[in-house]
Image: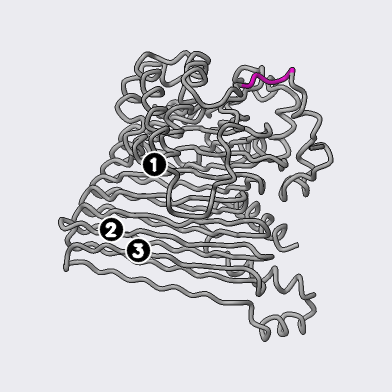
């Protein structure tokens, strides 16, 4: 296999992001690549200087992982061989607080992704993870003065917030949830910790960016965010990876705790390469009067299992999910959302759009559960699919479990193709056929892009244009 002759993934090619020679110098990396066993887990725990309870948690998670079967939902992932996935890879560089101090090859990657520019222009703080480690982290002074904590999770684990981490870590996503949650519990590395004190409104977003650069590796970052009573936060997550001829794995976890009358928005643009198995788990719990908003764009990976879940625990809590998925050649993207209504007078709104092209398979999968106690609950699900040729596929698999008669629930789904009449009209106005198709797809995606900050809406539209080529 001659990886240097491989082309970068879409998105990378347009910006000239990836220089193969930089990622292939073994002296720049420390890699644990002995298979998944107790020795591997203990090596990772030692690298992280874990407290005893975390080391024991990792070992227990490994036991659960061994006993769990591969999930029986979603696309076939039999091509993923964990014996050939490196559980931990790090650059020989410590985390930096100044962008100037980040090693050149890492800095060049993130510069071309626009991370430093975004930080200067529109973000309250930025964390950047490269493979298994945070390489850069910085927060603006005015945010720190509000009492907001934004740091890497490993540092938080060794700070005065250690008890808070222990009380919340993998409580929403226990290792028993599914096989890859257990895997995450055993080998997690990196990620972010955010705490927003009561009543504090963070006016501009925080962001974490994850880059998996090593071939045959896994990335297992853990994001833990606590938005206390009456507080507000917008957190943006971005992901990317270069393309290799070997499988890579992303099995991160996101746990979000939204307090009473608090508001949390979590935006994600995922641009993984098409050799990636993206088996990510995201979950939020919302207290009385709180609101959780998800904005999700999935444009990469070979196979995806991605279903952010919201538990509406408190009375009058709310959830809104807005997502788009684009499946191209060789991609099978199984995405959607889940919501559990527990409190009274709770409400949820799930709105998704999916596109498939060049034989790509896009599947919308959702679960809406309204418990017996969730009287007065309202839930609405809408999913629209657009197929751009006659060899692609789009499926809708909604599930609804309603256990009270005092609920208002609705679902609608539409699957269609680009109209010849619409194409003819746009071409009669001077557009080429390719331009016309791109305009139609961009308009289809507009409800999602308008929910993003301007810079990220532009990024999403550029990804759509690249996919349409």
Q: Rate crowding at label 3 as few (under 14), some (14 to 19) or many (20 or more) other CA atoms within 10 Å.
A: few
The percent coordinates of residue 149 (x first, y second) are 42, 27
Q: Earlier in the sequence, mark 3 or mark 2?
A: 2
Nearer the observer: mark 1 or 2; the answer is: 1
| As drawn, 413 above or below 121 | below
User: What residue is drawn where x is 54% and y is 36%?
Assistant: 208
Residue drawn at x 62%, y 50% is 302
- Between 339 and 461, the residue placed more toward the observer is 339
Q: Is residue 289 above or below residue 345?
A: above
Judge whether residue 156 is colored magenta: no
Sequence order check, earlier mark of 3 and 1: 1
Tell us which disc is closer to us: 3 or 2: 3
Q: Label 1: which residue?
A: 178
Q: Position of residue 289 (x, y in %)?
A: 25, 50
In the rendered structure, the answer to whether residue 370 lies left or right of residue 256 reads: left
User: Under tag 3, what secondary structure?
Assistant: strand
Q: Quadrant of residue 437?
A: bottom right
Q: Nearer the viewer, mark 3 or mark 1?
A: 1
The quarter of the picture where residue 129 lies is top right
Q: Is residue 226 visible?
A: yes
User: In which quadrant will I find the N terminus?
Assistant: top right
Image coords of residue 81 (percent x, y): 58, 38
In front: 86, or 403? 86
- The region drawn magenta spans 27-31
The kind of secondary structure element at disc 2 is strand
Residue hosting label 2 = 369
Q: Which residue is mark 3?
A: 399
Q: Quadrant of the C terminus?
A: bottom right
Callout 1 secondary element = loop
| Identity of the residue drawn at 47% across and 16% down | 42
Q: Residue 29 lies in magenta, yes or no?
A: yes
């Amino acid at each position: 296999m001659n990886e240097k002759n491989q082309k970068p993934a879409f998105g990378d090619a347009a910006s000239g992001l990836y220089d193969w020679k930089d990622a292939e110098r073994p002296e720049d990396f420390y890699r644990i690549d002995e298979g998944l066993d107790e020795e591997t887990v203990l090596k990772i725990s030692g690298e992280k200087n874990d407290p005893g309870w975390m080391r024991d948690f990792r070992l227990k998670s490994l036991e659960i992982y061994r006993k769990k079967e591969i999930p029986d939902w979603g696309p076939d992932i039999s091509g993923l061989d964990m014996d050939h996935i490196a559980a931990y890879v790090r650059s020989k560089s410590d985390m930096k607080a100044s962008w100037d101090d980040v090693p050149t090859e890492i800095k060049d990657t993130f510069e071309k992704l626009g991370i430093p520019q975004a930080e200067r222009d529109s973000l309250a703080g930025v964390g950047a993870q490269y493979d298994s480690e945070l390489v850069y982290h910085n927060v603006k002074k005015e945010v720190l003065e509000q009492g907001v904590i934004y740091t890497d999770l490993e540092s938080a684990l060794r700070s005065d917030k250690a008890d808070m981490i222990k009380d919340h870590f993998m409580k929403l996503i226990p290792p028993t949830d599914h096989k890859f949650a257990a895997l995450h519990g055993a080998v997690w590395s990196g990620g972010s910790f955010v705490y927003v004190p009561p009543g504090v409104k963070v006016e501009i977003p925080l962001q974490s960016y994850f880059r998996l650069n090593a071939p045959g590796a896994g990335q297992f970052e853990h994001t833990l965010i606590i938005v206390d009573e009456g507080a507000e936060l917008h957190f943006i997550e971005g992901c990317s990876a270069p393309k290799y001829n070997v499988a890579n794995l992303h099995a991160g976890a996101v746990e979000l705790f939204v307090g009473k009358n608090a508001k949390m928005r979590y935006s994600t643009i995922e641009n993984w390469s098409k050799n990636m198995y993206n088996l990510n788990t995201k979950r939020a719990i919302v207290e009385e009067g709180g609101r959780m908003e998800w904005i999700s764009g999935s444009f990469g990976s070979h196979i995806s299992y991605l279903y952010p879940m919201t538990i509406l625990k408190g009375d009058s809590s709310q959830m809104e999910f807005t997502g788009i998925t684009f499946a191209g050649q060789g991609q099978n993207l199984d995405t959607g959302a889940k919501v559990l209504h527990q409190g009274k007078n709770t409400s949820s709104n799930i709105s998704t759009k999916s596109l498939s092209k060049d034989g790509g398979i896009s599947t919308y999968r959702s679960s809406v559960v309204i418990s017996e106690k969730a009287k007065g609950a309202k839930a609405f699900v809408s999913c629209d699919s657009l197929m751009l040729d006659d060899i692609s596929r789009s499926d809708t698999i909604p599930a609804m479990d309603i256990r009270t008669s005092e609920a208002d629930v609705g679902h609608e789904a539409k699957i269609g193709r680009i109209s010849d009449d619409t194409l003819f009209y746009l071409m009669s106005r001077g557009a080429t056929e390719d331009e016309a198709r791109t305009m139609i797809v961009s308009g289809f995606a507009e409800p999602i892009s308008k929910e993003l900050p301007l810079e990220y809406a532009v990024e999403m539209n550029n990804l759509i244009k690249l996919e349409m080529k």
